[in-house]
Image (spheres, rainbow, N blue to C red):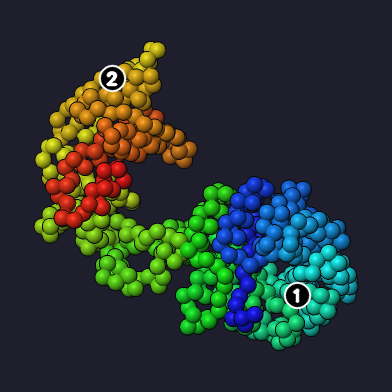
Amino acid sequence: MDPNRVCVFDTTLRDGEQSPGCSMNTPEKLRLARQLVELGVDVLEAGFPIASDDDHDAVRAVAREFGWVSIAALARCNRLDIERAASALEPAKRPRIHIFIATSDIHLKYKLRRSREEALEETIRCVEQARRYVDDVEFSAEDATRSDMDYLYQVLEAAVAGGCSTINVPDTVGYSYPDEYGRFVAAVCERLRGRAIVSVHCHNDLGLAVSNTLAAIEAGARQVELTINGIGERAGNAALEEVVMALKVRQDRLPYTTGIRTELLYPTSQLLTRTIGVGVQPNKAIVGKNAFAHEAGIHQDGMLKNRLCYEIMTPQTVGIPETLMVLGKHSGRHALRARYEQLGYQVEKQELDEIYHRFTQLADKKKNILDDDLMELLEHGADESVAAFQLEAIEVAVDGASRAAVRLLRQGKPAAGQAEAEDPITACCAAVGVATGHPIAVQSYAVHLDESTRLNSADITVCFGNQVYAGQAEGPDAINAATNACLKAVNKYVRNRWGPARRPAGSQGAQARSATGD
């Protein structure tokens, strides 16, 4: 085996789901397990079978479906726990029972209420029991970093003598400092002298889980226990994506490899977020929405000249499609011009200066500047044929069929339309079509209420002949939001008819994007 190969033990489905609000049922675990296997984890800890019948069944289902992968199940140093773990792992071709017992005096005295001798005897007995079920047994000394070293060595030696092939020395409460933890792991490796793989499992109570994990690898640990997005008990675990990318990017300092397909890191993070309904902070390393986003003008200028100025890895390396240039009050003219070029519009210097002035005024009032906002800024001095329509008033009557009347403004000039349809929103869109002179066919729409803002958000897709456009908007009620969303689509359609005259030569790609309403 390559001495620099690090085994990735994923415990998202076990320690990760123990985090409040992050529990998963069997179908959810199977879906995420499929992604983790595709990602390339070496060991998949599927759950804690004694915890519940559903957890037992989930481990069994994962073991059955992914028989070629090493599947682990957690058990306390307890006869019933081990029997339950063995039962759940029966379908697995490569089963691992992961047993643990606390070794620190504070845990022994207050939690287990056992003496050191009793805990040592239980370790020996339970390792032997687990070995009768499976060949692969991992032993964890809970709260290892706060344990007396002489006693810890006694327990670890007993576990290895009983047949454990992996020894885990976790920083259970996230108390260690990287240099300190590195020395601790080096001492354990020296004591075991290759008779077992040394594994580490670091918690993030002081924000040092990833740093401690990397220090442990340098000290000789060759298995790391991680979770996607760093979820887990209290402040969480060492984040898989951060450890893996640190090894990949800093090969000069950390010449170690894993079997992880890094381009699947972001999709895996997103799947977990959708599954548990708990997102990551925007500035989360590797997978946060701002990890490859730039707003400051100085940074954007540097990125446009050479991305190495501010990015030490490409977003594609971790599965993110592209760098995001976020336009806001800190952005400069270079970024604004670049975004217009991406949209397919050539803006000369004098016009850019005028637009930039209006842009900064808008950015002071609005946190997120959207492409629609940029187009409205671009159209500010345009002729009437391309000016945006704005909603002034709506009237709706429902009596069997729905009748709608809308009044619009375009550069201060009114336009009105009336129409009838089966439902109010379709009627309003049809009335917009009459008022704008561009007949509309509604393809689909969805409206939902945001409980925090009490605003209705609408997404609508409409057709102008064979061209399809989408619009999104918010409003105090569903009809208002949907009608404004329809107007967004109309304005995109109007811009598209005008846009090619402003586009630089050779911008067919931009024209194609605009024609689909993107």
Question: Is 228 on the left or on the right of 89, as rendered?
Answer: left
Q: Nearer the viewer, residue 156 or 181?
A: 156
- The local crowd at label 2, few if under 14, some if 14 to 19, many if 20 or more residues have their Cα within 10 Å, is many
- In the displayed structure, does residue 353 sit left or right of residue 406? left
Q: Nearer the viewer, residue 217 or 439?
A: 439
In the image, what residue type sits under mark 2? Answer: Ala
**On the rendered structure, is 212 left or right of 399?**
right
Q: Is residue 372 above or below residue 17?
A: above
Q: Which mark is residue 373?
A: none
Marks 1 and 2 sit apart, C-alpha to C-alpha, by 75 Å
The residue lying at 28 percent from left, 29 percent from top is: 440
Q: Residue at x 77, y 64 (%)?
A: 97
| Amino acid type assigned to the residue bearing label 1 in the image | Ser
Q: Name the residue: 30% across, 20% down.
A: 404
x, y (%) of residue 231? 59, 59
Residue depth check, mark 1 versus mark 2: number of the one nearer the observer: 1
Against 262, residue 46 (above or below) is above
Residue 40 or residue 274, whichever sits in front? 40
Quarter assignment of residue 403: top left
- Does label 1 or label 2 sit earlier along the sequence? 1
Q: Secondary structure at mark 2?
A: strand
Whether 280 is drawn above or below 386: the answer is below
Give the total of numbered labels: 2
Q: Which residue is mark 1?
A: 165
Q: Residue 419, which numbered label?
A: 2
Q: Is residue 10 shown above or below 417?
A: below
Q: Position of residue 114 (x, y in %)?
A: 86, 68
Secondary structure beneath dot 1 equals loop
Q: In the figure, residue 175 lies in which quadrant?
A: bottom right
Residue 266 at least partly seen = yes
